[in-house]
Amino acid sequence: MKYSKLLPVAFVASLSASLSYGAEVEFQRFFGICDDEYGSVTDLAAATGECGIIQVMTNKYNAENGDGDTIVVRNVPWGDHYQALTTSVAGGTAPDISVMHRSQLPNYALRDLLTPLDDLFASAGIDSADFAGAALDAVTQDGAIYGLPFDVHTLLWHVNLDLMTEAGLVDDAGNPLVPGSVEELFAHAAQFKEATGKEYLALRGQGGPFVGWVFLSLVWQQGGKVFDAENKAPNLDSPEAKAAAELIAQLFNEGVANPAYDSAGTQQAFIQGDAGNMIYGTWVVNKMDAQAASGEVELKNYYVQEFPALMGSPAVWSDTHMWVVPQGGNADTAETEATARVLAYLYEQSGTWSRTGHLPVRTSYIESDDYTSQPHRSNIADAVKNAQGMPRTMPNQSQALSILNEEIVSLYQSDKYSSYEEMAEAATARLNRILRRW
């Protein structure tokens, strides 16, 4: 089924009326394929990881919704998702609901490719006033809400407590000493290396946007801006940007972190006890807990906390998974009601999704015993307050991040540039080309 830009008036008037039959809701997502393990599971407590939890949530809704609705999943690989979505919208075959990142929202909302959801939320009982500030900001464009936020995901500081204890980097309560400045970071790294002979930090240096994410976080901690929304331009000439990029290069050049690690290598170094700390996302908290509990890897005593304020005030890169309703033709009332019911179900299950390690989006749940009683959550609950993103009106955010990542990596991986200033000039020229329509 397809949607016009404005929801049918009949829907708003009749949503509360229960129909005697349901409808199929086409549901496009990534998060992987795990049918072999979870294809028939409906017990939410039995699911782990992003793939497992979203699969079991879908199974449970299809089995128990009571309205005869069926979620029909379009499972698209992460790297192909947005091309597939754009193609389907252009061809009139868009899904009824699709997952989307905050960083992609301007590319669609600014071209009127998504349905504003304010009226639907009001009719379906979805209370946007309960959304945490970062989550509400993520789904809002030009004063209208275009998505149902599902999480805020960000970088965290993951710790092998046994190795940190061996290095003498714990307090009297046994909690890890996490650096609060650049000076402490290098002092801790030297002490750790001397005591254990291992790497202090696992940080992905290859094949992904992690370097760019860390760079943005460090600039924001200093009060700087990488992208200036007022002037609609990149801002790499600032002392904050230079200090952030040079710190990242120093971490790799001085052996505090290994620049050869890709995603798998970063996680394996931490899991197998080759690194004492790891900068990685919220989405591996569940996985790291499971690995530590398995008894089959070197990681036995796992701890996680917010990304540290190394260069000033707390601030960290973030993005958001949200659910959007792509534009299309008019839908009949039954189909539109079914979509509303699925969105209402996802809203109610946002706490279940937070078991991945992603930060929940509902303030009422963040403050609940159910959330704070989960392992590690009290350590990371405030991360959503310090989460930041690129300017809401900025298009091509993923492309911009890729350019930043590539150019900063060149500072420690090659002799392409002789100075930060040379790199900044080249990166600015590339960024201006993709942001010319901002």
Image (tube, rainbow, N blue to C red):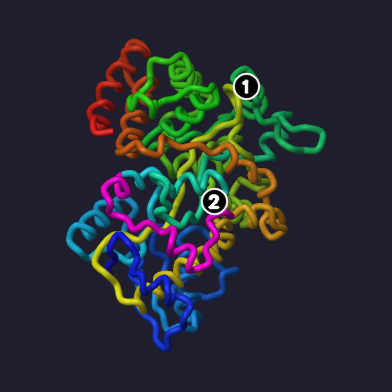
Q: Is residue 38 left or right of residue 163?
A: left
- Residue ID at (27%, 56%): 85
Q: CA distance from mark 1 to mark 2?
A: 26 Å
Q: Quadrant of residue 338?
A: bottom left
Say what secondary structure mark 1 lies in: loop
- Residue ID at (61%, 35%): 276
Q: Which residues are the magenta region?
A: 107-130
Spot occupied by residue 166 in the image (x, y as percentages of width and height): 71, 33
Q: Quadrant of residue 424?
A: top left
Query: Mark 1: few, some, or many residues within 10 Å (few <14, many ≥20)?
Result: some
Q: Is residue 225 visible?
A: yes
Spot occupied by residue 28 in the image (x, y as percentages of width and height): 34, 63
Residue found at the very far left of the displayed protein: 91
**Image quadrant in which the N terminus is located:** bottom left
- Earlier-in-chain disc, 1 versus 2: 1
Q: Is residue 421 left or right of residue 319?
A: left
Query: Mark 2: few, some, or many residues within 10 Å (few <14, many ≥20)?
Result: many
Residue 275: within the magenta? no
- Residue ID at (58%, 37%): 386
Spot occupied by residue 5 in the image (x, y as percentages of width and height): 30, 59
Residue, disc 1: 181
- Residue ID at (46%, 48%): 320
Residue in the foreground of this view, choosing between 287 and 11: 11
Residue, disc 2: 358
The three-letter amino acid code for the residue at tag 1 is Ser
Q: Is residue 296 visible?
A: no
Residue in the foreground of this view, choosing between 262 and 402: 402
Q: Is residue 381 above or below residue 221?
A: below
